[in-house]
Image (cartoon, rainbow, N blue to C red):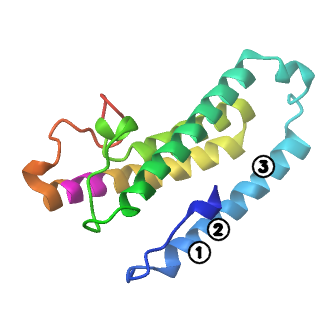
């Protein structure tokens, strides 16, 4: 999956700050996971693996991950064909929300928070939520400004049919 990431050859807007921020969040998340699963997750036993909470969380996580991969592919495919650099995403939940890929990521982290049932899951969900919600507002506004009447007026910011 990470090998699908592409950077435009003429991209001029790369900043080191988000990369460092992402590295820090990943480091803290990894530490919390190790600490939680190895030392504090005493309830994480065979009974837990059979619990509804674990299976619901696992289903939510994997469905979110599958949606994320799918919607990232839809975004990548916009650049694989000749045409303008910026285009309106279509297909999947993009027909209903500008930042459907953000929703998919939050859905996956919500599933992880449910299945892990600890501070590690709450941390990554919260950090992602605080990061992605304002970005969804900004991205939605950008599309409205860039494409005007061409942009579907009924699209939500991030959560299809809701927001």
Contact, mark 2 vs mark 1 (Cβ under 8 Å) = yes
**Residue 118 magenta-highlighted:** no
Q: Is residue 65 left or right of residue 147?
A: right
Q: CA distance from mark 1 to mark 3?
A: 20 Å
Alpha-carbon neighbours of circle 3 within 10 Å: few (<14), some, or many (≥20)?
many
- Residue 94 occupies quadrant: top left
Q: Nearer the viewer, residue 110 or 11?
A: 11
Q: Earlier in the sequence, mark 3 or mark 2?
A: 2
Which contiguous range is marked in magenta?
A: 137-143
Residue 123 position (above or below residue 49): below
Residue on which disc 2 sits = 24
Percent x, y of residue 157: 29, 43
Percent x, y of residue 2: 63, 60
Q: CA distance from mark 2 to mark 1?
A: 6 Å
Alpha-carbon neighbours of circle 2 within 10 Å: few (<14), some, or many (≥20)?
few
Local secondary structure at mark 2 = helix
Residue on which disc 1 sits = 20
Residue drawn 40% across the image and 42% down it: 100
Residue drawn 63% across the image and 42% down it: 122
Local secondary structure at mark 3 = helix
Contact, mark 1 vs mark 3 (Cβ under 8 Å) = no
**Residue 141 magenta-highlighted:** yes
């Amino acid at each position: 999956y990470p090998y699908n990431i592409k950077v435009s050859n003429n991209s001029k807007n790369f900043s080191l700050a988000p990369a460092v921020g992402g590295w820090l969040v990943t480091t803290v998340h990894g530490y919390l996971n190790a600490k939680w699963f190895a030392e504090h997750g005493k309830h994480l036993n065979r009974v837990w693996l059979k619990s509804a909470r674990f299976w619901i969380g696992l289903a939510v996580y994997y469905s979110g991950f599958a949606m994320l991969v799918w919607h990232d592919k839809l975004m990548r495919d916009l650049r694989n064909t000749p045409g303008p650099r910026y285009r309106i995403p279509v297909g999947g939940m993009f027909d209903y929300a500008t930042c459907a890929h953000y929703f998919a990521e939050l859905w996956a982290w919500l599933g992880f928070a449910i299945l892990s049932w600890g501070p590690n899951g709450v941390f990554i969900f919260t950090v992602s939520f605080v990061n992605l919600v304002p970005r969804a507002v900004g991205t939605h506004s950008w599309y409205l400004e860039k494409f005007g009447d061409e942009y579907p007026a009924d699209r939500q910011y991030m959560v299809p049919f809701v927001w």
